[in-house]
Amino acid sequence: MYQYYARWIREGKLKPDSSWNKDLKIKFTLQDPCQIVRKTFGDPAADDMRLVVKACVGEENFVDMVPNRSNNFCCGGGGGFLQSGFKEQRLMYGQTKDNQIKETRAHYCVTGCHNCHAQIHELGQVFGGGYHAVHAWTILGLALGILGENERVHLGEDLMEVNLPEKG
């Protein structure tokens, strides 16, 4: 989907507005999912994901992890590991990702897949990350002004009231 979102943004068919974050200056980073980036579409997909996130939050509010794109670290939640029953081992493996996110000092880690989201959300809780894990489509919905009140469960207090659609 992220390749489509990026194409539609480039073509002007999808118009996210990052002005909501101009004064807030909330920082975002991005998890490059293994299946989408490293195992399938490569760096072009990673670049498309960055284009989408930057269009939604403002380029100046995006902080890349190091390393990134095809060289980014796995979060440790994919390949069935979330359901494997080896929670301690999964979290220990994921600590590398948690540290990487913390180094960016971002308030939010945008994820492109459900496994990454669930794992990174749990990593932040277990290791006191101080960041939120949020799906890319949530940030896109926020930047388009269509994200409803009931779709904000993974956002922090700082974004709960931002760009709420008018009731009517």
Image: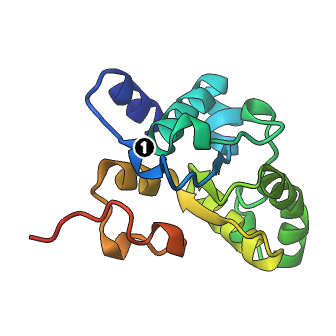
Q: Secondary structure at mark 1?
A: helix
Q: Which residue is mark 1?
A: 18
The residue drawn where x is 88% and y is 63% is 95
Residue 166 in the image: above or below residue 60: below
Instruction: Report whether 5 appears left or right of 85.
Output: left
Toward the viewer: 41 or 24?
A: 24
Residue 137 in the image: above or below residue 152: above
Rendered location of residue 98, percent (x, y): 82, 61
Residue 129 in view in this figure: yes
Instruction: Report whether 137 appears left or right of 97.
Output: left
The residue drawn where x is 38% and y is 56% is 142
Which amino acid, mark 1? Ser
Rendered location of residue 150, percent (x, y): 34, 76
Q: Indicate the quadrant where residue 119 lies.
A: bottom right
Rendered location of residue 101, percent (x, y): 78, 54
The residue drawn where x is 30% and y is 68% is 148
Residue 108 in the image: above or below residue 91: above
Image quarter hosting the N terminus: top left
Q: Indicate the quadrant where residue 127 lies.
A: bottom right
The residue sitting at the left extreme is: 168
Rendered location of residue 110, percent (x, y): 59, 52
Toward the viewer: 158 or 140?
A: 158
